[in-house]
Image (cartoon, helix red, strand yellow):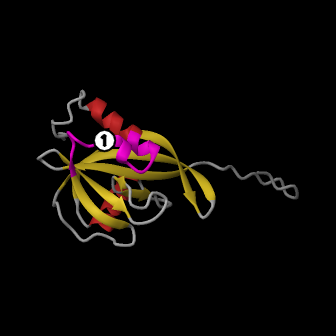
Amino acid sequence: MICAVCGFRLYFNPAVAVAVFIQRNDGSILLIRRAKDPGAGLLAPPGGFIDIGERAESAVHREVLEEVGIRICGLKFLCSQPNEYLFDGVTYPVLDLFFTAQPIETEGACDSEEVHAVEWHPATTLQGDGLAFPSMRAAWQAWLEGCAGNARDPVVG
């Protein structure tokens, strides 16, 4: 977009968000059931938008603590995926950065405005098509491929 008066250019670049697949020692993956649209009632890994001046890794830790009230360790980058986020009638382009991690604790207080429920799903039965956004489904597929197709083995690291 270019201002006809001053020539200022505004580039409509993607916002950046993070999400993390947290895996317990028994192989289960932590997912939230979203409380708000888009995707209310659907499953998602915890995550959210990166704040201005914030590192992606810091955003992961902050979002997990805010949404599900737990601390994580062993954070590793998994992949990036493009996404679209419909909010207030506007579709925003988003670049989602996905990570993996392990929980330091497995229970905490969740943010009821953002999270309807916290659920642990066995990685061996988790179907990516149940995740809220196409980017999450693609990232789950990347996680499966990274485990050489064997989701029974916990993520190590």
State left or right for residue 37 relative to residue 127.
Answer: right
Q: Is residue 79 visible?
A: no
Amino acid type, mark 1: Gln
User: How many C-alpha atoms fall within 10 Å of the one at disc 1: few (<14), some, or many (≥20)?
Assistant: few
Q: Is residue 73 above or below residue 138?
A: below
Q: Residue at x 24, y 27 (%)?
A: 148
Q: Quadrant of the C terminus?
A: top left
Nearest to the observer: residue 109 or residue 125: 125
Residue 126 is one of the magenta-drawn residues: yes
Residue 14 rendering spot, x and y as whole percentages = 57, 49
State left or right for residue 86 relative to residue 37.
Answer: right
Q: Residue at x 20, y 31 (%)?
A: 150
Q: Which residues are magenta?
A: 121-137
Q: Which residue is mark 1?
A: 127
Nearest to the observer: residue 114 or residue 66: 114
Examine the image and state in which quarter residue 64 appears.
bottom left
State left or right for residue 137 relative to residue 83.
Answer: left
Q: How many marks?
A: 1
**Residue farthest along the left direction in this orientation:** 26
Q: Residue at x 34, y 72 (%)?
A: 112
Examine the image and state in which quarter residue 104 appears.
bottom left
Residue 123 rendering spot, x and y as whole percentages = 21, 42
Nearest to the observer: residue 9 or residue 124: 124
Q: Residue at x 88, y 58 (%)?
A: 5
SS category of the residue bearing label 1: loop
Q: Is residue 140 above or below residue 114?
A: above
**Residue farthest along the right direction in this orientation:** 5
Q: Is residue 74 above or below residue 62?
A: above
Q: Is residue 38 visible?
A: yes
Residue 89 is one of the magenta-drawn residues: no
